[in-house]
Image: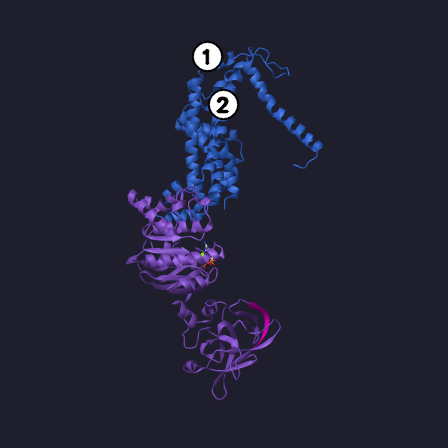
Amino acid sequence: MNQSTPLGRIIKLVFLVFFTILVLYPVLWVFKMALSPSQGFDASLNPIPSHPTLENFRYVLFEMPFFRWLFNSAMVSISATVLGVFLACTSAYALSRFRFPGRATAMLSFLVVQMFPGVLMMIPLYLIMDYLGLLDQMLGLVLVYSTTAIPFCVWMLKGYFDTIPKELEEAALMDGASTAMVFWKIMLPLSLPAVAVTALFSFMTAWNEFILAAVFMNSRDHYTLPVGLKLLVGQFSSDWGYFGAGAILVSLPVVALFFALQKNLVGGLTAGGVKG
Amino acid sequence: MAAVKLEGITKKYGDQVVVKDVNLDIENGDFVVLVGPSGCGKSTTLRMIAGLEEISGGKLSIGDRVVNDLSPRDRDVAMVFQSYALYPHMTVADNISFGLKLRKMDKAEIEKRVLDAAQILEIKDLLDRKPKALSGGQRQRVAMGRAIVRQPEVFLFDEPLSNLDAKLRVQMRAEIAKLYQRLKVTTIYVTHDQVEAMTLAKHIVVMNKGVVQQVGAPLELYRAPVNTFVATFIGSPAMNTFPVELVNEGGPRIKGQGFELPVPERFVPHLSAQKQLTLGVRPEHLHALLPGETAKISARVDVVEPLGFEVHILGEAGGQPLTAKLGPDVPVKAGDQIELGIDLDHIHLFDRATTYALGRKAPT
Ligand SMILES: Nc1ncnc2c1ncn2[C@@H]1O[C@H](COP(=O)(O)OP(=O)(O)OP(=O)(O)O)[C@@H](O)[C@H]1O
Ligand SMILES: [Mg+2]
């Protein structure tokens, strides 16, 4: 790679710069909308706002129930993550370590449900939630988000658990640990990278999810952030400036979380392959 | 410390029987080594004693308790694994004290035991390190430390030295022997290295295909193997075997391909109608032919291995591959045809059909 000719390197650079711009341009545009005083949709190609202002941020933060929605989003996402990851850990452990009837079927069905787009489940889920009286309730969203994240999390964690040598558990058993102790004191601490990845995945999915939240939550006070922001983009008029500001505010926690877990993430994705 | 008793212990995976009807009476404070070729069921037997593998049949007692259905934690045994199995996320001290903490032992007592173990194993300086910062030999010591702080009734070792290089293996072997001398705890040790078996064991159990072949003190197995399997498994290089026929020409004699020997007096009472026998001669019981010696065999030399204190020759005799240990000064070279004297006091005779030694009853 290092021995490429100067020409080759230039081509590579141009290529990379081109795609970077391609990816970043829409993001820059959101910033432009957020920082422009008008609520219009400025179609010019220049991504630099002409009269930058923080007015849109002020409006979204203080004139709208932003913090209410933030609280809702945080509660729902964190609960869904904790519940989903916990259940995924225990089931992945069982699938990785125990042989029982229905094991292969369970693994397969987890894989198969991943193949359908989530919207397909909207109507059945709505009916179930209605039946359970969980419509317009945070608990309903928590249950839905954690269960939809579980299949991916189970596969991810099972793959990781499989790489942890069985002797470690046997050594702990010999040392006097119960199966539960082995799980808590040996398996989980050793699987932290994988747990971090799945937790981030669950959190992001729940945090960004719009459709189900929009369908299930009716009262304004129960909206999550994505649903709340959608209010700004109406059928007849759209407040693009507020929307841009809101979009940036919503993505900040996820970006922060991503940077916080970054080291674990990279480690998490490679460690499964190299551990003996 | 406790005695361990296996009565008819059997392990099946589906229809496949991998350990069959093992009966062992291991005394309190004994050092028993299970040896046998790969896949013969040594680890499975050990793991059944540990409680890591379910027992399909038979009765296992530790002390005066039947432990078949007890989980490992209730058996009070400690095990050292081939892969060491140290907990990667814990320091050496935490690794060693894990079992004690689980038992909710008093903090001061834990500390004392960890320090004692670290002292004995000379790993005091390593207590704060994580396993990944240790060498193979150091990991091995930590694994042993984890076992000894527990002060268990029984120690189990599954090929603890096979991941070490040759020199370290010799050193750790001596360490284990020393440790045993010091603690005198009942120990069951699995290996397929027969030097380890011979040097460490008070008693050796030779297994093949899930069946115990012979149990005895190391020298007993060396001197009086019950069958050709034990005969060729114990001793290094392995015993030479030749198919021979029993004839009676002015006394019982055995005839092989290109050689003929009188049957020593000690076998005579055990001779039967069975004429097809196997002659066993250990490499160390062959020597350069002395003048006038008649118990001899002619051998072709293929390879000469001068080891300094002795010379090993590999070749062929009586239609069979042959190994001999000769004195350091015997002038031989590859390609030679030489005559070797046979030490009749040390030959072995086996019934070729049952593979059992003359005078030994084959199990039915
Ligand atoms: N889970 C299992 N299912 C089926 N067969 C098994 C299982 N575990 C072990 N075996 C078989 O049991 C036999 C004994 O295995 P074991 O591990 O006890 O051998 P070993 O004597 O320890 O060999 P080695 O010296 O190679 O460690 C082998 O033939 C092995 O294939
Ligand atoms: Mg084994």
- What shade has chain A been given? blue
Badge 1 marks a residue whose secondary structure is helix
Indicate the position of residue B261 as horizontal and vertical percent values: 50, 82
Residue A252 numbered tag: 2
User: Both on one chain, marks 2 and 1?
Assistant: yes
Query: Most prominent secondary structure in the magenta stretch?
Result: strand
Query: Label 1 is found on which chain of the structure?
Result: A
Q: CA distance from mark 2 to mark 1?
A: 20 Å
Residue A134 numbered tag: none
Q: Name the foreground residue: B337 vs B36.
A: B337
Indicate the position of residue A230 as horizontal and vertical percent values: 51, 18
Q: Inspect the magenta stretch and tell me whether residue B256 lies in it.
A: no
Residue A92, by quadrant, is: top left
* N-terminal-most mark, 2 or 1: 1
What residue type is disc 2 on? Leu
Indicate the position of residue A86 as horizontal and vertical percent values: 41, 35
The residue lying at 55 percent from left, 10 percent from top is: A37
The range drawn in magenta is B298-305
What residue did someone put label 1 on? A63
Residue A82, by quadrant, is: top left
Q: Is residue B94 above or below residue B50?
A: above
- What shade has chain B been given? purple
A21 relative to B224 in the view: left or right: right
Q: Answer whether residue B225 is visible to the viewer in this image.
A: no
What residue type is disc 1 on? Glu
10 Å crowding of disc 1: few (<14), some (14-19), many (20+): few
Q: Which image quarter holds the C terminus of chain B? A: bottom left
